[in-house]
Image (cartoon, rainbow, N blue to C red):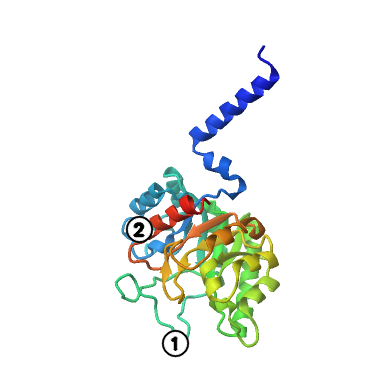
């Protein structure tokens, strides 16, 4: 007799078989620890505009399924309109989850030098829109493209006056994003964790805004902060992460898994952080494709994210 128990057993087997065939077995076996692996396109800043579609296809072929966009020398979204860029990514199996913008007009900090490319030459930064001058336009375009988050990549914090002005812009942008139906987050470097006129910019951002945070795990570590402790202190505030590795001096960025960051411990705290998406990033690598391949292999095969 084909009883209810056999029916449920067979149904479960069919469901598991379908799961395996659909490519979602990783999610089944890893449960809530399974995450899509994303990439921040700034990793390809020096080369993507030479062949946007070809570069994105190669990224997808490695296994990445989510993208966070950044600045393009072609203007717009790698030479495309928001909906056009989103549609192309979808056509090759990539989800556009987030986009980086500047908080204010770009200028180098006092005494700082322009970062260099893989050949040691100073990079050239094209004119870029920013939240202080073009906030509503940038929010509207992000919403048009269907991204989940608009992210402030950096903002002036050299003085307390800078920080307060930045907080005003960030709060206005957060409200505009809420009205547009998208999230808003702030991406850190290490400078936000250093004291400026008796105040720590990152602590001010956390206490004086309601925006979410995209924690760059390596820069936070360089700034003297333990990411896991930040998650515990502000649970659910960190839906986005940047994942890169560094050597012991913090001077050299490396593929994930080849440096000093304990990523197993950090990923074990993903639920506390409220992490929804993470993006591999390697600033100005000599071989971007080799770097992101090594990072992907480590994250998926050794770390099992």
CA distance separating discs 1 and 2? 33 Å
Q: Is residue 40 above or below residue 103?
A: above
Residue at the extreme left: 119
Q: Between tags 1 and 2, which lies in front?
A: 2
Q: Is residue 199 above or below residue 187?
A: below
Does residue 67 show up?
Answer: no
Label 1: which secondary element: loop
- Residue 142 in the image, given as x and y percentages of width and height: 53, 57
Which residue is labeled 2 in the image?
290
Residue sitting at x 37%, y 49%: 57
Tell me the number on the disc at residue 190: none
Q: Residues within 10 Å of mark 2 (few under 14, many from 20)?
A: few
Residue at the extreme top: 1
Which residue is labeled 1 in the image?
111
Quarter of the image for residue 44 reads bottom left
Quarter of the image for residue 169 reads bottom right
Q: Is residue 272 above or below residue 252?
A: above
Query: How many discs mark residues in the rendered view?
Result: 2
22 left or right of 173?
A: left
- Residue 273 in the image, given as x and y percentages of width and height: 64, 60
- Residue 11 in the image, given as x and y percentages of width and height: 61, 25
Front residue of 213 and 223: 223
Residue sitting at x 39%, y 78%: 114
- Residue 223 in the image, given as x and y percentages of width and height: 55, 76
Front residue of 5 and 55: 5
Q: Are marks 1 and 2 in contact (CB under 8 Å)?
A: no
- Screen quadrant of the N terminus: top right
Q: Residues within 10 Å of mark 1 (few under 14, many from 20)?
A: few
């Amino acid at each position: 007799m084909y009883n209810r128990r056999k029916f449920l057993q067979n149904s479960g087997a069919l469901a598991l078989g379908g799961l395996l065939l659909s490519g979602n077995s990783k999610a089944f076996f890893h449960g809530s620890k399974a995450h899509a692996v994303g990439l921040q396109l700034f990793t390809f800043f020096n080369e993507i505009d030479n062949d946007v579609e070809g570069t994105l296809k190669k990224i997808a072929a490695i296994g990445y399924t989510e993208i966070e966009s950044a600045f393009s020398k072609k203007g717009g979204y790698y030479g495309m309109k928001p909906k056009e860029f989103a549609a192309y990514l979808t056509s090759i199996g990539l989800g556009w989850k987030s986009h980086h913008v500047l908080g204010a007009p770009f200028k180098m900090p006092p005494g700082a030098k322009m970062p260099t490319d893989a050949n040691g030459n100073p990079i050239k930064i094209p004119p870029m829109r920013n939240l202080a001058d073009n906030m509503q336009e940038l929010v509207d375009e992000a919403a048009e493209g269907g991204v989940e988050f608009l992210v402030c990549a950096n903002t002036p914090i050299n003085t307390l006056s800078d920080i307060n002005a930045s907080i005003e812009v960030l709060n206005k942008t957060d409200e505009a994003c809420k009205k547009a139906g998208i999230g808003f987050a702030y991406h850190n470097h290490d400078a936000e964790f250093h004291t400026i006129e008796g105040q720590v910019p990152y602590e001010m951002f956390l206490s004086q805004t309601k925006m979410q945070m995209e924690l760059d795990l390596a820069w936070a570590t360089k700034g003297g902060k333990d990411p896991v402790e930040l998650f515990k202190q502000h649970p659910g505030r960190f839906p986005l992460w940047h994942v890169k590795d560094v050597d012991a001096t913090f001077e050299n960025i490396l593929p994930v898994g080849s440096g000093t960051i304990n990523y197993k411990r950090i990923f074990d705290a993903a639920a506390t952080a409220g992490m929804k998406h993470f993006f591999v990033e390697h600033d100005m690598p000599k071989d971007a494709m080799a770097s992101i391949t090594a990072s992907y292999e480590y994250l998926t095969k050794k770390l099992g994210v």
